Amino acid sequence: MPQKCYFNGDIITLENEMYADYLLIENDKIVCVGAKKEIEKYIYNDAEMIDLQKKTLMPAFIDTHSLFFEYVFSLLYANLSDAESFDDIKKLLISYKEDNHIKDGEWIIGSNYDDDFLKEKKPPTAKILDSILPNNPVVLQHQSGYSGVLNSKALEILKIDKINDGFLKEEQFTANLQKIPIPSINDFKNAILKVQEKYASFGITTMQEGTLVDSMDKILTLIIQAKLLKLDLVGYIDIKNGNKILEKFDESIKKYNNRFKIGGYKIFLDGSPHNKTAWMLEQYKDTENHNGKPYYKDFSLTIDFKKAISDNMQVLAHCNGDAAAKQYIECYKKAFNSSKRKHNIRPVIIHAQLLTEEQLIEAKKLDIIPSFLVANIFYSGDILIKNFGLERASQINITGSAVRNNVLFTFHQNPPTIEINMLETICYAVNRITKEGRILGVNQRITPLDALKAVTINAAYQYFEENIKGSLKHGKLADLVILDSNPLKVEYNKIKNIKVLETIKEGKTVFKL
C-alpha cells in the first residue's frame, strides 16, 4: 500500500505540538507528523497526496465502555425509542412482527422504551403486552438496559412468577435476557457488521464488550474464526461467570487475536441513579431511608480485587453511587496493600456518576481511572434532579473537579443505552445542559480539549495502549478520523453538529460519508 500524506487542514496531534502541517502514513502506521521539511525526509515519490481542504484530521475516537453484543442484538429488536405512548408501542411492535415475518410462538424483543417520556409515565404491564401480541413471548427492554417488561408467554417460558405486572429490573432482568434464544447465524453476522459500521460512522476504531459471560463463548468463537471484526474489540470478563471464556480464549488475553482481546475483569457494585438503585451515602429525594443497596460485601470484593491484582488483570467496575465508590476505593486499597505482587492494573470506575471530589482525590492516589457517563447530563439530567434535588444532581460526573485535581479520566456512552456519538458527548461535557435546557453544574464544565483527550489519548491509556493509539505520533497506528469542523475552534454548543467525514483504521478507510 503506497504512502498517504495528508495536508491543508487542521491536523490535531494531541501531542505537545498540538497542530501539524502534514501527516504521513505508510501501511498501518504513522511515519511522520510535522512541517513539510520533516515530511520530506520520509516521503516517497509515489506517495498519495490527500488535500484535506481545510477539514480537520485527528486521532480516531476510542470507546471505553459499551455493551457491543447487546448493541448487536438491539439491531435485531423492535426499536421503541420514538414511542410516546402505549399506543405507539403497540403500533411499533405489530409493524415489527409483520415487517420481519415473525411467526406466532417466536420471540419478539422491543428495546429502548422510556416510561419517563411516555404519556402514561409508567411501563406497560404484562397484561397490556398480552393484548398486543397474545401469541408471542414478548420482552420490552428499558433504554437503560437494566429493566424491562415481559408478557405472560415470556414469563411462562422463563419460569418466572407473574409479579409486578411482568416488570423486572437489575440482575433479575439482565440474567433472564441472556436466556432468550439468539437469532440465526446469518442475521447475527450481518448485525455484527452493521454495528461496526455504526461505530465507524462516529469516528470510533476501538470498541468494547463490557460484560463477557460464559454463555457468549460460541459468539466469540464465531467472530474470531470468521474474522468478522473490522475494528478492535476489547472484552471484559464477568469475574463471577467467565472462567470458560478465560480458559477457551487464553490466546486473546491482553493481546489481539483477529482484532479481539480480553482486557480484564468486570464487576458490578450497584444499580443506576435513574432507577434509584445506585448505592448512595444519603437517601434519595422524597424517600424514607432509601439509598439503594450494595451488590457486594466488602470481604468478597476485596478477594476479587486481590485476584485481579494477582492475575495482573485490569478491573472495570460498574459503580454509580458515592457509597459504591467508597466501597470500591477502600476495598481496592486494602487488596493492593495486602497483595504480594503489586501490579498496577489501572482499575476503572465505570459510570462514576456520583463520585465525590474527596473520593476522586483518593482514587488518584491508587491510580484508579474514573470513566464518566457524562452524556447522561443531557439524557437523564432532568430525571436525576427529581431523584436527588438540583444541588446534588449538579455534581454528577464531576469532570471539572477531575481537571482541577489533575486526574486522568475518560468518557463513555454505555451503548446501546446512549448512542456512541463522541462529538455529542464532548458537547455535553463542555456545556452540561439537560434535555429541558437546565444547566447542571457550571463548576463542572470543562474545555473542549480536556473533553477530547477523554475519548482519545486518555482512553488509549485506559486500555494500556497509549504507545500505539490516542494521538498522532511516529510509530503509532494510523487510526484516524476526518471531521468537517474543528471541535477546538467551533462554538461550544455546535460541537455536537460536527460531522464525521471519514474514519480510517490502520491506514484503511472503514467509513466515508
Image (cartoon, rainbow, N blue to C red):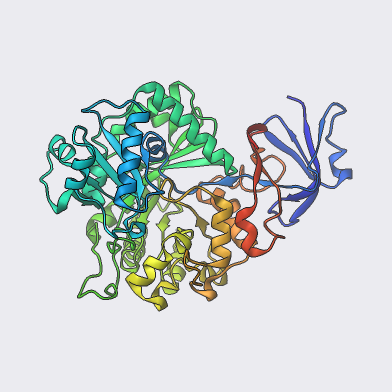
Q: Residue 109's spot in the image, x, y percent?
A: 30, 38
Q: Quadrant of residue 511?
A: top right
Report the residue at 36% width, 61% height from top. Answer: 320
Q: Is residue 62 left or right of residue 340?
A: right
Q: Quadrant of residue 39?
A: top right
Does residue 241 sit above or below 121 in this rendering? above
Q: In this view of the protein, can residue 20 be seen by the observer?
A: yes
Does residue 311 sit above or below 368 in this rendering? above
Screen quadrant of the C terminus: top right
Number of residue marks: 0
Does residue 224 sit above or below 389 in this rendering? above
Q: Is residue 165 left or right of residue 476?
A: left
Report the residue at 49% width, 23% height from top. Answer: 227
Q: Residue 286's spot in the image, x, y percent?
A: 26, 76
Q: Residue 324's spot in the image, x, y percent?
A: 31, 64
Q: Residue 481's spot in the image, x, y percent?
A: 66, 43
Furthest residue to the bottom?
A: 391
Screen quadrant of the N terminus: top right
Furthest residue to the left?
A: 161
Q: Is residue 170 left or right of residue 10?
A: left
Q: In this view of the protein, can residue 246 be seen by the observer?
A: no
The answer to which of 359 and 304 lies nearer the viewer is 359
